[in-house]
Image: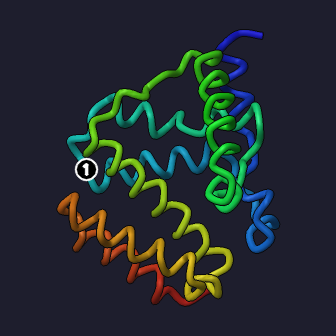
Amino acid sequence: MSKTLRAWRASFTRRWHTNPDLCDTLDYDAGHQGRVALLILSLFPDASRTLLCHAITHDQGEAAVGDISYDAKKAHPELHGIVDVIEGRERRAQGFDFANLTDKEHRAFKLCDHLDAWLWMMRHARYLNHRSDWAAQYQHMLREADWLSVKPEVFALLRAEETRVPV
């Protein structure tokens, strides 16, 4: 199979399938990666090509193992290490290797990756936003946004979603 077809097919890897609160939502890696890139462009308009390429390909390796939950990776660091190796091999097999981010770029990427997850949760299961893990993520995002000098923009984004009336 060509690298291009392999990459295109990998973009259909389903997110949240191991999360009991969000497993019924339909989100694919391609959508998530695109939204992360959109957030980066919106918050960091001078983002480097490397950062944007990383954003739109960062979960492509999940095609080899699936979307392993954050909780599982946190509880089992050895699993996290093995999954990272497998996902890295898969990304390289697709022709993607954009791991050379600066510290600031990495923090901007992680902020936007977490923002997308939080916004997805608020759109599909907003009752979770007061749970301790989501509340901790919220506070972490604000601290990172402050460090990256985008706290007013991030706070406004979070607040807009918090006050949105669900349909």
Q: Is residue 52 above or below residue 1?
A: below
Quarter of the figure that contains the C terminus: bottom right
Residue 16: quarter of image: bottom right
User: Residue at the location (68% across, 27% down)?
Assistant: 8
Is 119 displayed left or right of 73 in the figure?
left
Q: Is residue 167 visible?
A: no
- In the rendered image, residue 97, in percent from the top left (x then y), is placed at 49, 22
Residue 137 placement, left or right of 51: right
Tell me the element at label 1.
Answer: loop
The total number of labels drawn is 1
Q: Is 10 located above or below residue 152 in the figure? A: above
Q: Looking at the picture, which amino acid does disc 1 mark? A: Phe
Q: Is residue 83 above or below residue 128?
A: above
Could you tell me which quadrant the N terminus lies in? top right
The front one of 139 and 35 is: 139
Is residue 144 visible in the rendered image? The answer is yes
Residue at the extreme left: 149
User: Where residue 118 sits in the image (x, y, percent)?
Assistant: 53, 69
Check disc 1 and report the residue beneath it: 44
Q: Quadrant of residue 74?
A: bottom right
Residue at (39%, 57%) from the top-left corner? Answer: 111
Residue in view at x 33 percent, y 33 percent: 101
Relative to 42, 63 lies left or right: right
Residue 3, percent from left and from top: 66, 13
